[in-house]
Amino acid sequence: MSVKGFIHKGKFVAISVTGTWCELLCKHCKASFLRGMISAPSGEKLWEELCRLYARGVRGALVSGGFNKDGVLPLKEDIVEALVNAKKRYGFVFNIHPGLIQNRDVALVLKEFTDVVDFEFTLSNYIVREVRRLPYEPLVYVKSIELMMDADLHVVPHIFLWHPHQSDERLLKELYVVRDLGIDRITLLVLIPKYLEVAVPPIDRLLNTAEKVRKVFDGEIYLGCMRPQTLKRKLDVELVLRGLIDRIANPSPTAMNYISEMYDACCSLPADLLNVFYIR
């Protein structure tokens, strides 16, 4: 099987439009991932950064940031204006972590500049209420996808291959739900238990679960950035060699030997946008 690899090297960056601010502070993250992104918390700052990045050769960006207490990435009007202008003037490719979408107007705003939506999906009450501290039922994630698809947005759900409060049974249910919604691409995540006192599962268990995913989901399967460093060397190679994934983000050096093509971008970008990010 031909597997594509993805890294962020020079043509693609991650930007936080809230700086290091996050009101939600999920238990497994606590805003730590934001510190590794370019900070652009205002429209003026974002426009300056995008112009500078384009001059440096950057052609795409992940738009991310902290969430408010409702699980939403707050996109101020000046932020949206900067993103729309960068799309029109420079042809920037954007994917986004928007959080929950609860009305169609917001989805239509995203449509103005977004090429793909990376959407962390779950049907776990525990993850929604205890880990993410949200006052909702998991059905809100299904409705969010429906609203985005109704606005003709390209949505790639991010689903936990492993989380200490996730079971294989619930994972398979999540796969059935997104498949029935018409989703044909998913990204698998393995929780990095940075702030949770839990042991990472053995490789064989993760591979067994990945086999189940491949059997029930007939679309494309990607391995996302989130996975513990201690697992990467063996897990990456086994997933590639067993044909369990179609794309992999930040592959381990050993796995690179088995990857057919490399791109300097996020792994969720549609195939028709990849040419500009091709490395080899």
Image (cartoon, rainbow, N blue to C red):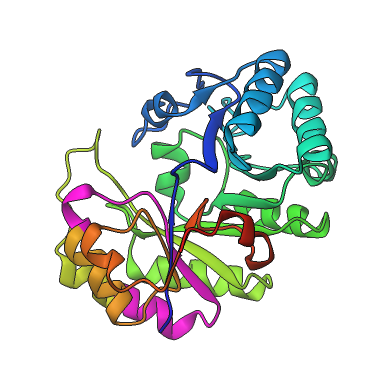
Is residue 217 found inside the magenta-colored segment of the image? yes
167 vs 218: above or below: above
- Against 153, residue 103 (above or below) is above
Place residue 177 in its image quadrant.
Answer: bottom right
Question: Residue 260, how many percent across, how many down?
Answer: 41, 74
Q: Find residue 33 and report its horizontal and vertical position in percent.
A: 40, 31
Taking the spot 75% from the left edge, 53% from the top edge, the residue there is: 148
Quarter holding the C terminus is bottom left
Q: Position of residue 234 (x, y in %)?
A: 17, 65
- Residue visible at 14% across and 63% down in the picture: 202
Question: Is 181 in front, or is 227?
Answer: 227
Q: Percent x, y for residue 140? A: 63, 49
Is 276 situated above or below 49? below
Nearest the eye: 76 or 103:
76
Name which quarter of the figure residue 68 lies in.
top right
Residues in magenta, as a range: 209-232
Seen at 73% across and 58% down, the residue is: 146
